[in-house]
Image: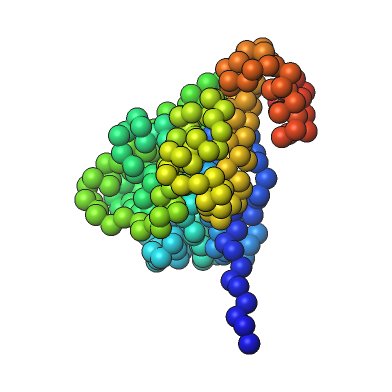
Amino acid sequence: MSKSLAAPVPVFKLYGETGAWPTPDLIHCESIPERSKLHGWEIKPHRHSDLVQLLYVQAGQATLKVEDEVNLVDSPSLQVVPALSVHTFKFSADTQGHVLSLALPLAHQLGALLGSPVLTTAVCYPVGAERAYLDTLFSALAQEYNQQQSGRDAMLQSLITILSIWLSRRKQALSSSDTLQVDRGRDYLQVFIKTLELRFREHLPIDHYAATLGIGNAHLNALCRRLAGQSALQMINQRLLLEAKRDLVYTSMTIAEVSDNLGFSDPAYFSRFFKRCTGQSPKQFRVQR
């Protein structure tokens, strides 16, 4: 009797969601009970190809598994879940806390700012005596995220930067040498994503990215589909689309200026690209938002 193949680990944008990043914001913030109680307080194994998550358990008990590392949490702790990491969570019904999701462009910006790869390593940090500080910080993040006040984007960026600095300092204090072991395929994909972040406006062909990695187009596409759940071209298009949405929502640039800023040779081509990906023209998207 032949063995059946194991089901592939699903790739989600957020818990249980496979659609595009839901807003032009580079973050998503919600409470642990808000999502987890809908799933019986257990989040099944999955991975995220284009976001990093920070899970802050304030109260209750939790089993947090990221790849092969399992942490049994019964005191305030902050778990970093890097992009591409397979993870699963189980919570007691009295668990309280927050889940903060950061789109990779923002995670890369923070890493460059701090000169630290603190968001690329799966670590569970005990909070200890700094609970009151983190409680206040996450409360401010949740409040700012759920309101639409002037300066919201700048305030969120500032609060997330503070949180990243806390993580960086905590990592240094613990002097942790444990690193997540990744297979060669994930190494390739991480480099591809970082290169894409730097050069997505250049509309480079897939074979350019593959050649940079020293692998073939088919190999790169296979890695993207296996680990990120989409082709290399889809990942390139999603990055362009995210930036287009942000330009349309947060700037006063004309459609032609947005097109030029993203490296499109013609505004009409940009509009066709945007509508093909979203079902709306850039103008319709801007008016709706």
Asked whether 128 or 284 is in front, the reply is 284
Could you say where residue 40 lies in the image, as x and y percent from the top left? 62, 65
- The answer to whether any part of residue 196 appears in the image is yes
Name the residue: 39% across, 34% down: 110
In the image, taking residue 179 as reference, residue 15 lies left or right, namely right
Examine the rendered structure and indicate whether residue 206 appears above or below residue 37: above
The answer to which quarter of the image holds residue 260 is top right
Report the quarter where the N terminus lies. Answer: bottom right
Name the residue: 62% across, 25% down: 244
Could you say where residue 33 lies in the image, as x and y percent from the top left? 57, 55
Report the quarter where the C terminus lies. Answer: top right
Figure disc tally? 0
Name the residue: 35% across, 32% down: 112
Name the residue: 41% across, 50% down: 187
Could you say where residue 96 lies in the image, as x and y percent from the top left? 50, 55
Asked whether 157 or 230 is in front, the reply is 230
- The answer to whether any part of residue 140 appears in the image is no
The answer to which quarter of the image holds residue 160 is top left
Q: What colouring method underlies this structural image? A: rainbow
Examine the rendered structure and indicate whether residue 9 appears above or below residue 84: below
Asked whether 73 or 168 is in front, the reply is 168
The answer to which quarter of the image holds residue 248 is top right
